[in-house]
Image: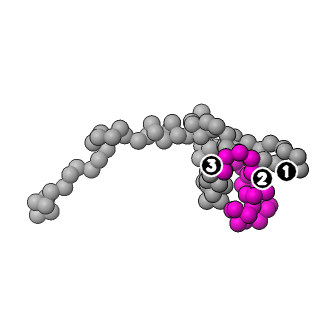
Amino acid sequence: MDSDIADLAKALAHPARLRILRLLQATPGCIGGDIVGAVGLAQSTVSEHLRILKAAGIITGDIAGPRICYALAPGALGPLADFIAALAPPLGDACCLPPERHDHDAL
């Protein structure tokens, strides 16, 4: 489980891959060659980023005629989101906050 979460985090750990995910989120449905123009990187670079995202299961890539259509994989980031949510203290929980400082403490 931890290695799966680490793999997801590693796949997200590049600004270009985050741009690709934002693009796929903003453009529901199938997009393929449009990714290169929208991301502004070389075809080979975009292909490598897509390969990493697909290998991590974050996106799907289906062949549609002469091109591959990419889309977000529903629920793929759920384990990572659950892990991050579990790390955050509940709202109003002061156990992890530094003590409140008063002006007279500086004297």
The amino acid type found where label 1 is placed reads Arg
Q: Is residue 52 left or right of residue 6?
A: right
Q: Nearer the viewer, residue 61 or 55?
A: 61
* Prevailing secondary structure of the magenta residues: helix
Label 1 sits on residue: 67
Q: Sequence-wise, which precedes: disc 3 or disc 2?
A: 3
| Residue 103 seen in the figure | yes
Label 3 sits on residue: 25
Question: How far separated are the C-alphas under marks 3 and 2?
Answer: 14 Å
Let me know if residue 48 is in the magenta part.
yes
The amino acid type found where label 2 is placed reads Gly
Residue 3 in picture, x, y percent from top left: 62, 38
Q: Quadrant of the N terminus?
A: top right
Q: Residue, x 20% and y 52% (percent of image)?
A: 100
Q: Quadrant of residue 40?
A: bottom right
Question: What segment carries the magenta color?
Answer: 27-56
Let me know if residue 38 is in the magenta part.
yes
Q: In the structure shown, which secondary structural element does the residue marked by tag 3 occupy?
A: helix
Residue 28 in picture, x, y percent from top left: 67, 46
Q: Quadrant of residue 7?
A: top right
Q: Sequence-wise, which precedes: disc 1 or disc 3?
A: 3
The amino acid type found where label 3 is placed reads Gln
Identify the disc placed on residue 32: 2
Identify the disc placed on residue 77: none
The image shows residue 86, relative to residue 24, as above or below, that is: above
Q: Quadrant of residue 16?
A: bottom right
Tag 2 and tag 1, C-beta contact below 8 Å: yes
Q: In the structure shown, which secondary structural element does the residue marked by tag 2 occupy?
A: loop
Q: Which residue is the extreme one toward the right?
A: 66
